[in-house]
Image (cartoon, rainbow, N blue to C red):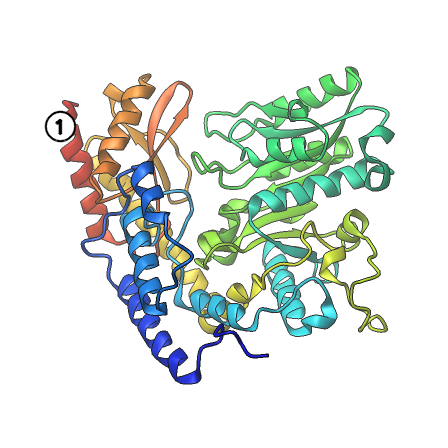
Amino acid sequence: MGSFGFDFSAEERRVIWDYLVEKLERHYSDHSGVRVAPPLDPEAVRDYCSVDFNNPVSPQDAIDYVTAGLDQYIVHTSHPGYYGLFNPRPSFAGIMADVVTAVYNPQMAAWSHSPFAVEAENYVIREIGRKFGYEPDSIDGTFTNAGAEANHTALLMALTRGVPGFAENGLSVSEHKPVIYVSQESHHSFVKAAGLSGMGRRSVRNISVGPSFAMDAGDLRRQVIKDIAAGYKPVMVVSTLGTTGMGAIDPVKEIDIVAREFGMWHHADAAWGGAVAFSSRYRHLIEGIELADSITFDAHKWLSVPMAAGMLITRHPSALLETFRISADYMPKEGKEFEIVDPFTHSIQWSRRFAGLKVFMSLLIYSWDGIERVINSQFETGILLKRKLEDSGWKIYNDTPLPIVNFGLAGLEGNQEKATRFCREVTDSGKVWISVYNTSGIGTLRACITNYNTDEKDLDELLKTLGDVRITMGD
């Protein structure tokens, strides 16, 4: 039996590698002339993807075809003119790690199959948990596909702890219907998680926010008391540290007081904003996060590794095993004499990619000091963007210290349709990408610093594009 041509020869591989690296290096090093966002034409994209799989092409032709498709038909989140949804330019260390992972392809379900990969991830989890302020001996966690899975994991842990017998028998064992609490600005993944867990989407309580768009802890307490009186069982409250829409930071200490008073699991969704824990200058912004029972953090956001590298970290060492413990006769039994944990008993996922290598290798190469300098630099770029917008007559609607700006004009206030049209004109230019976020009846334009290479000249390009659209639309 041969390799069926799947491997190619050593010489062929060398030529293909060289060709592929040249193509990728060209894209990675130069975005000049590249549209940040493509024109949206579903029929054209589907036509482009409709190829004949009965007729093989050369690897070089396949590379050309795929990279041309990506050049034309994606939003280039690694472009310095992308001010979007926490999708960063991936660092080169992270890219290298993804290549290594693809070649070695470790199986992450069983410890005995990938001891290095499992322990490298465990080490990263512990080190990041320490940065968040957890006691070293209490830290546990798992890598997830992304923040939504981490948030779902937190809810399942909360139900397992808050509803005895839930893991084995489900919600039928609960005398009272469980409910969870999030702010009006929280991520919608909690609504999805409530549906998937069997609680139902209506079990999510949206707590009002104050002037800074952070959760009102007083309103939280009032709602919990109201729910208990109505026969519900509060099982979890979520503090969001860096909301997607406006970068709000919930009062985690005040929320934790309510959580302890009513015996709720306290989860911190710090998927993006949690990265400030790695900056001595800005760590105070999320002070109190160490009080949370669990934390969501996405390294593929502010740590600039390729997607996806989410994490669920907890200060309760037995919580994940209580939630996901299972036995399977066909799984490898090697290593059972050691004090180890098989990842498939520890998370939602079974077989999965070695996601943690992107973080491990990035820290190995850049160090915590390098990460801190990047985070501080993006704060500075965000401050500069706010100043330039205000100097140009734009109104700023959020006051977060994080590098995310919600802004607009008098002519856009209360006119969601016009704000959306304005944003579309900006992105259709192909020069920059921003989004619209609607709050309090106001359609704000939203720009977030996600790229460590975005500098003042890129900000000036954004301001020029915004100014050009203002003239075009008569604002």
Q: Can residue 130 be seen by looking at this rendering?
A: yes
Residue 52 pos. (x, y %): 38, 53
Q: Is residue 15 above or below residue 191?
A: below
- Dot 1 lies on which element? helix
Q: In this view, does 33 lie to the left or right of 197?
A: left
Residue 312 pos. (x, y %): 64, 51
Q: Name the residue under label 1.
A: 472
Residue 268 pos. (x, y %): 61, 42
Give the residue drawn at x 70%, y 62%: 109
| Quadrant of the drawing holding the N terminus | bottom right
Displayed quadrant of residue 158: top right
| Quadrant of the drawing holding the C terminus | top left
Q: Can residue 251 be seen by looking at this rendering?
A: no
Q: In this view, does 187 lie above or below 375?
A: above
In terms of depth relative to the viewer, which is nearer, 277 or 179?
Answer: 179
In terms of depth relative to the viewer, which is nearer, 253 or 234?
Answer: 234
Displayed quadrant of residue 38: top left
Displayed quadrant of residue 133: bottom right
Residue 197 pos. (x, y %): 71, 35
Q: Is residue 284 left or right of residue 116?
A: left
Give the residue drawn at x 29%, y 41%: 44
Q: In this view, does 67 lie to the left or right of 342?
A: left
